[in-house]
Image (cartoon, rainbow, N blue to C red):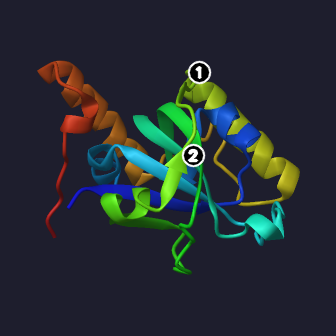
Amino acid sequence: MSEIVVIFTCKTRKDIMEVGGAGWWKIDPTRVATAGRVLLVHNANDPRQRGDQDRHGQAFLCGTVRHVRQDEDGRWLIQFEEYAEVEGSFRWPGYRNPVAYMDADEVLGSVEAGEWQRMPEVGFPDAQAARRAWDAARGGRKAPSATSGSRSFGAVIEEHRQHLAEELGVDPQKVRIVIEA
């Protein structure tokens, strides 16, 4: 079974374009990279940004994964290579967690994609700045500042993953660090 990442989000198309994808989630980056595709579903009830009740729970955009990058607080941004607006019968199944890994054939069989377009590349520092501005404007979760003195464990691991990938001459998404306790 191939998977697709399905995300229940209040973010608008404009918000998605500002960061080049969908963020900032607690995800399994290897699983997301392996899935290679993301389907975004409209959440009209998020208090930080209310949406169109008529579209609540409906899929609205599909993207292919370009990068999976981690911010200092351990949350991840999934940047898209290309994207298409979608319509169809798929509805958010009501899970509590806003990120779900689902059967790609089943999900994609219930949506119809419009014309695929290349997502303009957004540098990670610009995406982080857009995140901080979005959060500040809505009084939401406070993203860490870029000058934060303490780093999360996830940020330390990601830095080491990048260094190992450089040393080995491989894609950072191919480096897996496992801690057994």
> Considering the numbered disc 2 on the image, is that residue within a helix, a strand or a loop?
strand
> Considering the numbered disc 1 on the image, is that residue within a helix, a strand or a loop?
loop
Residue at image coords 21%, 27% = 165
Give me the disc on residue 22. 2
Residue at image coords 29%, 53% = 31
Tag 1 residue: 120
Label 1, residues with CA under 10 Å away: few <14, some 14-19, many ≥20: some
Q: Left of 31 or right of it: where is 116?
A: right
The three-letter amino acid code for the residue at tag 2 is Ala
Q: Earlier in the sequence, mark 1 or mark 2?
A: 2
* Residue 146 visible at all: no
Quadrant location, the N terminus: bottom left
Which picture quadrant has residue 114?
top right
Instruction: Choose between 88 and 180: the one closer to the eye.
Output: 88
Q: Left of 180 or right of it: where is 102?
A: right
Instruction: Choose between 101 and 158: the one closer to the eye.
Output: 101
Label 2, residues with CA under 10 Å away: few <14, some 14-19, many ≥20: many
- In the rendered picture of this protein, how many numbered marks are placed on residues? 2
The three-letter amino acid code for the residue at tag 1 is Pro
Instruction: Choose between 147 and 23: the one closer to the eye.
Output: 23
